[in-house]
Image (cartoon, rainbow, N blue to C red):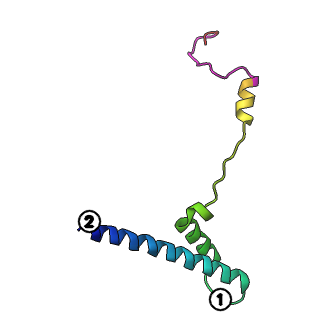
Amino acid sequence: MEANARDYRDRFEQAKRDFGDFLEQLALSRVTDPQGNRGSDMLVVALLNANLPSKYRPNVTVVDNTAKDLLKRLGMTGTKRTGKEGAP
């Protein structure tokens, strides 16, 4: 039974790789031959993002310290508001 589970897992992973290869080929064919009624380019992008995330999902990290810098300038970092004036 364990061998069947391992075989299934291997075949499933191979099917996922094959589908990813198919999507990449589909995207490439749309770039090299942009003519014709062929469906949604955005759907192909979404499928690439979902099925090959390590390669196609955008990993964007926004680093904006504007609010942190403003609070620091106002002297408000690291203090709790207790409701008492003058108390940290």
- The CA distance from mark 1 to mark 2 is 47 Å
Q: Which residue is painted at 67% across and 79% down in the image?
A: 28
Q: Which residue is painted at 45% across and 73% down in the image?
A: 14
| Vertical placement of residue 24 versus 53, above or below | below
For the N terminus, the quadrant is: bottom left
Mark 2 lies on a secondary structure that is helix
Which mark is drawn over residue 2? 2
Q: Nearer the viewer, residue 2 or 64?
A: 2
Q: Which residue is painted at 39% across and 74% down in the image?
A: 11
Please state the extent of the stretch shown in magenta in the rendering: 73-85
x and y percentages locating residue 24 in the rendered image: 61, 76
Query: Would you say the magenta stretch is mainly helix, strand or loop?
Result: loop
Q: Which of marks 1 and 2 is nearer the N terminus?
A: 2
x and y percentages locating residue 34 in the rendered image: 72, 85
Q: Which of 80 and 25 is in front in this view?
A: 25
Which mark is drawn over residue 11? none
Q: Residues within 10 Å of mark 2 (few under 14, many from 20)?
A: few
Residue extending farthest to the bottom is: 36
For the C terminus, the quadrant is: top right
Q: How many labels does the image show?
A: 2
- Reading the image, the residue beneath label 1 is 37
Q: Is residue 84 a member of the stretch shown in magenta?
A: yes
Q: How crowded is mark 1: few (under 14 residues within 10 Å), some or many (20 or more)?
A: few
